[in-house]
Amino acid sequence: MENTIQIGQVTLTLKMDLIQDQQTDVIVNTTSENLDLRRGAVSKALLEKAGHEMQKEIHNAKKSNFIISTKAYKLNCKEVYHTFCVEKSRRDSQKIFYESITECLWTADAKEHKSISFPAIGTGNLGFSENEAATIMLDALKQFAQNAPESMAVYFVIHPSDHKVFQAFKDQMKGSNEKHPETIPRNTDQPSYCIPANLNPQ
């Protein structure tokens, strides 16, 4: 089950699959602030397939703004980007979520990667609703797509058991495809989003 739309230079595909089985250049992970990859369904699944060398590396790795990059080990990708989103109840949680997605995309672009897979970030322990997560991820992607210098294939990979999450992402994508990207309305009670200065290609 897949849905694909074109947004500027980006081809976005929504699919039901296991994140650890993706064969894109980059796979994105969400991890806890203490860097324990055994916590959280996505982290745990990636750790089990990649092997414990990835856990060792992440403890010694240097964090940039919102992500740590590690080798792929036994995963079928070139790199893994570990993001550090925070619970919805925390201050600036939506802004951090948005900028984590943005940093993953611009980092992949800077390293000339052509494809990247994201899980449904925020829909588990972080407490975002399916629609909130889908909206933030799509908003970040649209902002990137308007400025991206090269084409990229982006995959939103939803666990096969998460039908409600898949439907929410599908609905948001349909709405985005029916409107011009610049005319997508934003809720006025949302924080304003921006690309971190060191990631803005302009």
Image (cartoon, rainbow, N blue to C red):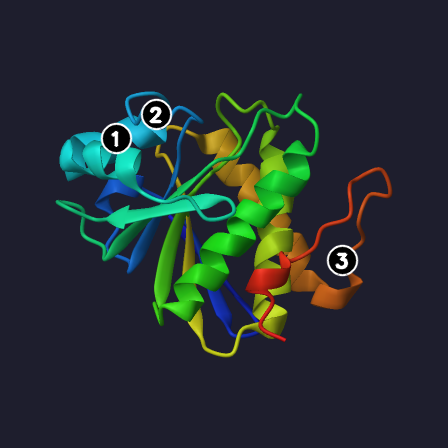
Seen at 58% across and 24% down, the residue is 87
Asked if the residues shown at circle 2 and circle 1 are in contact, with their CB atoms under 8 angstroms apart, the answer is yes
Instruction: Judge by depth and name the residue closer to the eye, 36 or 147.
Output: 36
Question: Which tag, 3 or 2, sits closer to the chain's start?
Answer: 2
At 21% from the left edge and 48% from the top edge, which residue is drawn? Answer: 72
Where does label 3 land, which residue? 184
Q: Amino acid at mark 1?
A: Ala
Q: Which mark is residue 41?
A: 2
Residue 63 horizontal side relative to residue 191, left or right: left
- Binning the other alpha carbons within 10 Å of mark 1 as few (below 14), some (14 to 19) or many (20 upward) gives some
Disc 1: which residue = 45
Count of numbered marks: 3
* Residue 134 in sight from this viewpoint: no
Residue shown at 67% from the left, 21% from the top? 89
The amino acid on which the numbered mark 2 sits, given as a three-letter code, is: Ala
Give amino acid for label 3: Ile
**Quadrant location of residue 168?**
top right
Residue 12 or residue 151, whichever sits in front: 151
* Of the image marks 3 and 1, the number of the one nearer the N terminus: 1
Give the image location of residue 46, x and y in percent.
25, 35
Where residue 12 appears, x then y in whole percent? 48, 60
Q: Secondary structure at mark 3?
A: loop
Q: Helix, strand or loop at disc 2?
A: helix
